[in-house]
Amino acid sequence: MQTLHNALRSTLRYLRVCAKWLVLAALVGCLTGPLGAAFGLALSWANATRDVQGWLLYLLPVGGLVIVFLYRHFDPQGGGSTNQVFAAVRERKVLTLRTAPLIFFSTVTTHLLGGSSGREGAALLLGGSVSGQFGRLLRLNRHDCRLMTMCGMAGAFSAIFGTPLAATVFTIEVVNVGSMQYAALLPCLVSALLGVWISGQLGVAPTAFTLGATAELNPITLAQVLVLGILLAGLSIVFCELLHITPKLYTKFLPNPYLRVAVGGLLIIALTKLLGTTDYNGAGSAVIAAAMVGQALPWAFALKMLFTALTLGAGYKGGEIVPIFFTGATFGCAVAPLLGLPAPLGAALGMVALFCGCTNSPLASICLGLEVFGGQCLPLFALVCAVSYMLSSYFSLYHEQHFLHSKL
Amino acid sequence: MQTLHNALRSTLRYLRVCAKWLVLAALVGCLTGPLGAAFGLALSWANATRDVQGWLLYLLPVGGLVIVFLYRHFDPQGGGSTNQVFAAVRERKVLTLRTAPLIFFSTVTTHLLGGSSGREGAALLLGGSVSGQFGRLLRLNRHDCRLMTMCGMAGAFSAIFGTPLAATVFTIEVVNVGSMQYAALLPCLVSALLGVWISGQLGVAPTAFTLGATAELNPITLAQVLVLGILLAGLSIVFCELLHITPKLYTKFLPNPYLRVAVGGLLIIALTKLLGTTDYNGAGSAVIAAAMVGQALPWAFALKMLFTALTLGAGYKGGEIVPIFFTGATFGCAVAPLLGLPAPLGAALGMVALFCGCTNSPLASICLGLEVFGGQCLPLFALVCAVSYMLSSYFSLYHEQHFLHSKL
């Protein structure tokens, strides 16, 4: 009788915790959905405006000075890097509330004025900060605030990209490679699903492409995809190292952060004028879309890496993921035909596998491929991601990412 | 110069290990592909033959006696349970070679004579044993033999179900819940992809259904799926407990294993005759297919659980997964309309979520949903799996499955 009573009590306690998290996660979804949507719409506006008003590019150094000023005065410790949110999750610290407006403003400014950056790192900071602080407001303990931060990351990522499953799996997979934060699975997914639904209602279109070409599953295709994966693993190492080395070089030659960001802005202007194209400024969605139908310049990937490293290294803000999509898609598009694969398929595989190599999150990458390109050629996406994961060794975009097990 | 030399050497060592595993995994795929195909074809033959030759059912007790005799004489320690292969992976032990013919023969016999069981547990043992022994033949160390066993599991699972990604993720996810064996990702995937390609060439059709109905992604659908997930989590607890309690009851009342298996066989015969249908004997693929188009008896799920517990508890062999598919699909099909969801969608969600609740492998379950039903309604599959995972608590089909973290 006593045993039955205890079992019933522990069952009820278990169910109460589940119910608590369903409610909290739904609230976070309702919070980060509109926020992510606002951020996504602001970035679309920024990119569209810059396309029309070419002169905005000349203001890039001025925008950079403002960004540096804001961070030095309001968040000197944080600095608006994606690593911040990883550290917050690992060390159970809550991101400050001012993280959110700072990253929102500085990322939109970077895109509006033609810096080359992404939006996902910014979305993670945005969602993580707001929902972590919301947890604190509800007087949750550190452990619960950590889970709130994760829900916010998934919700905002999902709202802005339209990929709820990839957002969820990324959040539970990326911080400690090899340890799945399954306790966060349901809460993050609920936030992500509500986030994407709300952002869809608010007019944010999900990132989605029709796979322009497919390939049959046979040993020859597998071998071709394997080689493509090896090349993309190598490229991911180059990408990560370039993004780590550039800020060090900047700091070495230009110790003053204001001078650094201004020079960075001038370099972007000079390069843009030299090349006579704005393909490499901002998010570059048009170039990614062109790669998906098989059109890309063979050197586009290298230029995008350069633009992104110069932009982010100088102190401009935004994520690294959309530049990775650009780099991977254009590289894959250019290289695939040499391996006997259709260029559009190469672009799709390249985009996903470079993401995987840089972030070491193979399952999130496979989910991304699935949600962006549909279920076709899933085995090929899985293979290219697995190869890219294994051969990218312990290089990572995020120095706050820890590897719990050997990769081999 | 010395540093560069060292870096080059460690890079080459890294690449050599990668290359070694690509070759080994491909060999395992070539080994387990035909084996899995032979097993799949034998089981198809067994089920088809029994459908025509109804009198075979009366031989079930005799078949049981043979199975018990074989296991008592040739593998008294092992016993042909799926737990064996989990223990082999965790403790870096290699399964004996005789595990393979024993499980092959006894599973086919169980299906041919009308016992209710699956094939996936058997496939894992089959693939794990042969490839682990192959590793030993190549004089690999214990660590490497463990990875060979995992490749074999993925290869055979994939060959028989036609779901390479689910097979891979299941293998790296299931043994220690919360720790992803990423080092096994690429090798397992290569084995699984080659396995499924070979078995396809040999005429094994992949498990695939067209999703008969879809639902729009909105908060109402999400709430409906959430409730369905809660019910399926409860059902998974009942399923697991039933499968654990039945052998204990059998042993308590019938300590002699020969008597036990014979009585089990007689019970199956009696129940079959009492119900006047062979729906619950063997794999029951026709019933699963009917549920996928919205047709299932409301009590079918309960009878399948009973048949399976009586069959496996008595000492007959085979996996638990196909009975789980049957139970989940018929339950989902019957319950979904009460929640306002289309019955075929309920069947699909039920099949995948019961698998998730019983095996505690949410990502493999999502992959399974994807590979069996295509990419449609992916967010709903993810949600139902996440709910089923969280609410099934620490109940598990496998007592050799360990939980590394708290589920909450």
Image (cartoon, coloured by chain):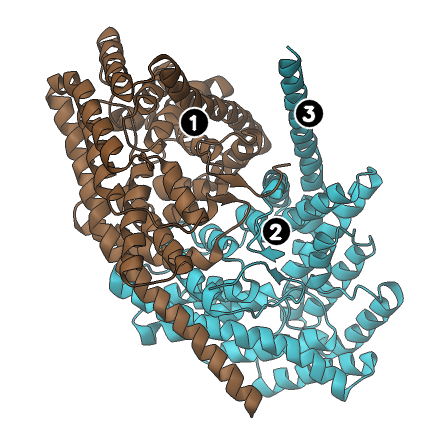
Chain colours: A cyan, B brown
Callout 2 and callout 1 share a chain: no
Residue denoted by label 1: B346
**Image location (x, y in percent) of residue B184:** 43, 57
**Image location (x, y in percent) of residue B246:** 39, 19
Give residue A13's mark: 3
Q: Is residue A306 left or right of residue A132?
A: left
Instruction: Report in which chain the residue with disc 3 lies.
Output: A
Instruction: Give residue B114's quadrant in the image.
Output: top left
Callout 3 and callout 2 share a chain: yes
Residue denoted by label 2: A171
Instruction: Give residue A27's quadrant in the image.
Output: top right
Residue at x 60% of width, y 67% of height: A283
Give the farthest residue toward the bottom: B1
Q: Residues within 10 Å of mark 1 (few under 14, many from 20)?
A: many
Residue at x 61% of width, y 56% of height: A176
Mark nearest the camera among 3 and 2 is: 3
Secondary structure state at the residue bearing disc 2? helix
Q: Is residue A263 left or right of residue A37?
A: right
Question: Taking B222 as reference, is B30 above or below it?
Answer: below
